[in-house]
Image (cartoon, rainbow, N blue to C red):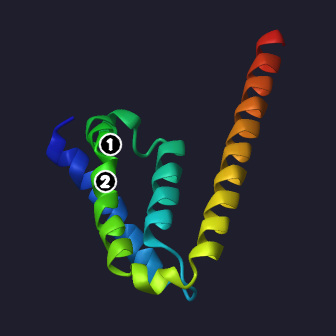
Amino acid sequence: MNIIYQIAIIFSICWVGQIIESLLPFPFPASVAAMVLLFTLLCLRAVRVDHIREKSDFLLGNMAFFFIPAGVSIINYFDVLRSALLPLLVICLVTTVLTFAATAYSVRLTRYLMDRRKTQ
């Protein structure tokens, strides 16, 4: 599919995510709303993976560039963050370990279910 159409699909979903964020009565990240919307559209087969494959592969391959502004902001506000450095480091460490554990157990559960399905 043409790259322009792929970009249009992805940015349209992001735009709808922004609209959903503005309509909700509570704070909710537009990016998460857009990801849920994209997941729903993919599950309902309203959007096929082939419709967005090339552009999404490009975005995933260059994801590190999207973290540069956040890293620069952290450096700019380091004097503010310094007062809460220890709690932030503890939070980062604990959440990293929890994320690794959740991922490992999710993979184990998925492998177990796939193996169980094969034997049936």
Q: Amino acid at mark 1?
A: Ser
In this rendering, position of residue 67 left or right of residue 33? left
In this rendering, position of residue 90 left or right of residue 32? right
The vertical placement of 31 against 77, above or below, is above
Mark 1 burial class by Cα count in 10 Å: few <14, some 14-19, many 20+: some
Q: Residue at x 65, y 58 (%)?
A: 93
Percent of width and height locating residue 31: 43, 65
- Mark 1 touches mark 2? (CB < 8 Å): yes
Secondary structure of residue under mark 2: helix
| Of residues 12 and 85, the one drawn nearer to the viewer in this rendering | 85
Q: Count numbered badges in the picture.
A: 2
Mark 2 = which residue? Answer: 10
| Of residues 73 and 28, the one drawn nearer to the viewer in this rendering | 73
Q: Residue at x 29, y 61 (%)?
A: 68
Mark 2 burial class by Cα count in 10 Å: few <14, some 14-19, many 20+: some
Q: Which callout, 1 or 2, points at the residue further toward the start of the chain?
A: 2
Secondary structure of residue under mark 1: helix
